[in-house]
Image (tube, grey):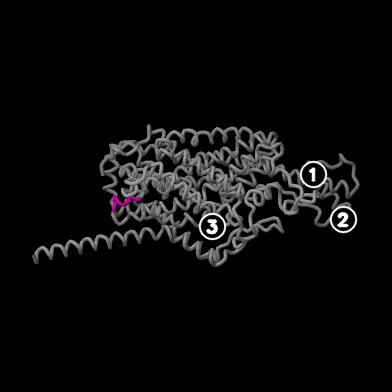
Amino acid sequence: MGKDAARAEWDNPMQFVLACVSYAVGLGNVWRFPYLCQMHGGGGFLIPYLLMLVLLGVPLFYMELAIGQKMRLGSIGAWRAINPYLGGVGLASVVTSMYLCLYYNVINAWSFWYLFHSFQSILPWAECPVNSNLTGHVEECERATPTQYFFYRETLDISGSIEENGGIHMGQALCLLLAWMIVYLFIVKGVKSTGKVVYFTATFPYLVLIIYLIRGVTLHGSINGVKYMFTPKMEQLANPTTWINAATQIFFSLGLGFGSLIAFASYNQYNNNFEKQAIVVSMVNSSTSIFASIVTFSIYGFKATFNYESCLERVRLLLLNTFDLAEDTISLENVIHWIAELNRTHPEQFTSLGGRLETCDLEAELDTAVEGTGLAFIVYSEAIKNMPVSQLWSVLYFIMLLLLGMGSMLGNVIAVITPLSDLKFISRYMSTKTLNGLVCLFCLLLGLGFTTRSGNYWFTMFNDYGATFSLLFIVLIEVITVCYIYGIKRFEKDVEDMLGHRLNCYWKIMLAGVSPILLIALFIFYIVNYIQGGTPTYQAWNKELGKSVVTEYPPYAQAFIGLLLASSVCCIPLTALYTYCKKRNLASGKRERTVSTVSA
């Protein structure tokens, strides 16, 4: 297919690279990768992670950029150009990206909410609010922690389960409106406005991460967290889940299968060197994950050490008061020694302490693994409140989260808009600005459902089931199509036409052999894991206990999960069937006209 001269293009290759970096480097680098490191053996997790980057991530990233640049179309048009029966692959990508757009901007709305609340003399999540009688603190907050209370009650005003509905949280709805207005301004003129925005969204988060790194490593106890990260637990390499999680992290972190990379590459010049860019963006993305983990674990270390020393201080005061000892007798350094000593010398009195004597363990504090919103909005905000000049660090952190989230949102929305704007019946009647505005308005209106009292449970459902299964299936179909339907030799000629040289052995072996096998294994593992998992569950907030409890989804929610899993995947066979029926009708119509002409 030749070059479309009328198509908009990036001003220069750097804009394209920054757009890919801004899209690929997102919230998952900050909250998902550190969690996986913590779960799977610290530094030892880097071995399967980097291996999967080479075997799976880079080749598939390269393939999607090549398709977009060659066809110069969005996902629907590109796959239809490769094979008329495969337009459903692009449609499945659009549906999956639409699901992501619906809920991903809600995270940006939460970031705005926290950012606006950071401009206070005392951060609102630093202490519990006073109850209505002014006689003490709110009971729910005392049962939980101030940071949990602020997230679940003030930010979400969450219900007790997905079945308890409630009205829209007006503050969250306004923050979501603001988030979508900014997304619209970023994409209003298509690639021309996006190309300018990415200079900021791709680079500023690194400045904040560097500032946070300098601050993080100077915090008391940060070294405990960094040591924990880089101390490998090699026995985790024998755990198959470690390798599965490494592969899925690479897969989703690079944003494969959504159609965003195909859309971005479609605005490249025809002879742009996407090969070098694929390698650079993949390496930048993985390096950012490791860099962000060092920052996160220094914060972890500070928080864990703070909690550990607070625990020791409570034990110290308990022992001093119970055994009537002088104030300077017991210190934080020798409290463990005194516990053993007093247990030996005053066993009866020591036994009377019962459940009041806490067990303080620094390793246990560091082992507490948290991911997702729990890390971003609860653990981090708890660490920030204990820092000097906490308001400054809070503002910086939530601006960084916003830019990471907005950068990824640009890719998500462009993955929807580009293939739609390629459709002739839409481009004929609608300007770019109008189409962009309608897509943003549509996503905003549906996204308001996530700002209701039970909205967070639906958010979790979309996050857990909206993309994983469909993306694995989409990319598996993509790589099989390119290598075995379109043909690796034709693909090789296309690459030579664009770059001036053929595919080397690495690309051919990975794309035709290794990557499809790994994708099939991941796909099977996901299905088996889903079946063995039994009834799907979610974390419901129990205000009486002040913590989340595991709860089964009701039948209608389980049916909706099934719909989420099937809806995007079904686009592939249904579109192929529609194309077949259409061709068959056209062929039969021609035959009828031929017969009638002969008869005449």
Amino acid type, mark 3: Met
Foreground of the two, 299 or 332? 299
How far apart are labels 1 and 3 at the CA level?
Answer: 41 Å
Residues at marks 1 and 3 touching, judged by CB atoms closer than 8 Å: no
Determine whether the residue tagged by mark 3 lies in a helix, strand or loop.
Answer: helix
Does any portion of residue 488 appear in the rendered image? yes
Residue 401 is inside the magenta segment: no
How far apart are labels 1 and 2 at the CA level?
Answer: 22 Å
> Which percent across, then down, holds residue 78?
32, 48
Amino acid type, mark 1: Glu
Does any portion of residue 43 appear in the rendered image? no
> Which percent across, then down, holds residue 165?
60, 60
Q: Quadrant of residue 434?
A: top left
Give the label, 1 or 3, closer to the camera.
3
> Which percent across, then down, holds residue 387?
69, 37
Magenta-highlighted residues = 76-83
Residue 82 is inside the magenta segment: yes
Give the label, 1 or 2, closer to the camera.
1
Q: Quadrant of residue 589?
A: bottom left
Q: Is residue 36 above or below residue 579?
A: above
Which residue bears the numbered disc 2?
Answer: 347
Picture residue at 41% right of the left edge, 41% below the top:
433
Which residue bears the numbered disc 3?
Answer: 461
Magenta stretch: dominant SS?
helix
**Label 1: few (<14), some (14–19) or many (≥20) C-alpha neighbours in 10 Å:** some
Mark sitting on residue 313:
1
From the viewer's perspective, tell me whether residue 211 is left or right of residue 193.
right
